[in-house]
Image (spheres, rainbow, N blue to C red):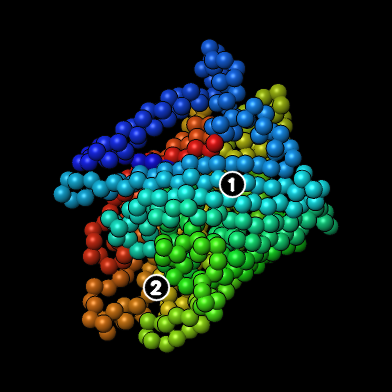
Amino acid sequence: MSCFFLKRRSCRGVRRRRFTLSLLCGVALALGASSNSDSGYASQPDAIRRWWEGSHLTGGWWSGRQFLESRGLNLVGDFSAVHHGVPIGDSREISIFCHCISLTARFDFGKMLGVEGLTGQAGVQWQTGKDINGKVGAGSAFSPAAFTGHWRWRLRPIDLTYVTPEVFGIKEFFTISGGWQNPKNYFMVQPDANVFQNCAFGGGGLAANDVAFDGAYIAWGGYTRIRPTSWSYVQAGFWGAVPEALNWRNRGVYFRLARPFRHNGVFVMGEMGVSPELGAASLPGKYVFGSYYWGLPNRSFLGATYPGRFGFYWQADQMLYREPAPLTEEYPLDAGLSQRDSARSQQGLFSFVCVSHAPKFNNVVPVFLRAGLVYKGLFPNRDRDDLGVAFAFGNYSYYSVLARRTQGRFLQRTSEAVWEVDYRFQANKWLRVQPFLEYLFRPSGSGHLKDALVLGVAAQLTF
């Protein structure tokens, strides 16, 4: 991910600006070369065309990648960078740069050992930079960057997953997984919400209430899932709950839980969902109800002590419109509607909504809402691009208002919100660039700071 502003006052800033400008120029050339027209490749060697159309920046390693994958080992690397900018009132700009490199190995033990359905993963990550939210002052649920720095080297998820083959005519009937995991990868999942940058569209609703539900938290545990039908599922997960898990110095908890062990708790999540296909065009959807329990002692705003926090969430993901398939020899005019539409099943308008609720006596944001629209392939010859607009709102607890008054703090928190607009250019399978705009209303909910505008450009490479 990457973004820039023109004003710099230091040599380091100049170097960053040059780097960013060079990246954007290269991206512009890449986007031009990525047109679906075959004429753009007429003068290029076949090797360059195959590299550009491949899945990785580093290519196939002279068939080495294919050799490893055929034997069950898939090696993946990603480079991401984000450069946020915040224009402020005295005509100066504040911009902050973060970047991340992650390396992951995925294992297919069916190919390796003949154990069908058993897979695994392990990886490491280098991440550094600064947090733009220090310049904006938003609440933890509305931090402008879902991607932030500080953590240097740390371990990525290391786990094993077993999925049964077809049982009772149902694929993936039973799943069990465990190890060093991030609960956010398996619960409250909304892929279209991940298009956006603000934390509100990730795990903001839970993170605001001191529940470690974001992309940085990893702990020992696991989950199980049962699919009684092809269109429904029930799942439950159990992980360690680590004190001060949201403190950036404690992110990743150093491949262990807190010491002494009695200071830890248990993080429990449960979820059930259905995935119907609506209408004659079979528009896919997903509707979910879930709950969670973060089992660490806490105090209410009025002084009572509780052994943990709990809450509930509801989510709906629905494709609203699918672009019609082109009328070709493969899909003639007299072909069925669903048959023709399936040719472009991923092009069209998608929506997502998620509402979370928690008791107001010990949760800062008892009511949280996020919603958005994403159009995939809006423009001709840009079938893999995403255009998205999203909104999130959090209502602060009235009990916290009362507690602040007793402390002599009369600047009260009421509500906080953010609008975000993104356009993700998918140049090819291994390069994407994403300019974005965020507008935050009442940062931290108090009105002490003015509304904030955050601009940026994001980039990611898969090598």
> Who's the residue at 47% across and 73% down the image?
243
Q: Is residue 226 visible?
A: yes
Question: Badge 1 local density, few (<14 within 10 Å), some, or many (20+)?
Answer: some
Amino acid type for the residue under numbered disc 1: Thr
Residue 436: % across, % down: 38, 43
Residue 34: % across, % down: 50, 26
Comparing 65 with 312, the one in front is 65
The residue at which mark 2 appears reads as 364
Q: Which mark is residue 104?
A: 1
Q: Secondary structure at mark 2?
A: loop
Single out the residue that lies furthest toward the top: 43
Quadrant in which residue 137 is drawn: bottom left
- Distance CA(mark 2)–CA(mark 1): 36 Å
Residue 450: % across, % down: 23, 58
Comparing 20 with 210, the one in front is 20
Comparing 373 with 138, the one in front is 138
Question: Badge 2 local density, few (<14 within 10 Å), some, or many (20+)?
Answer: many
> Who's the residue at 74% across and 40% down the image?
71
Task: Tell me if residue 64 comes above or below residue 186 in the rendering.
Answer: above
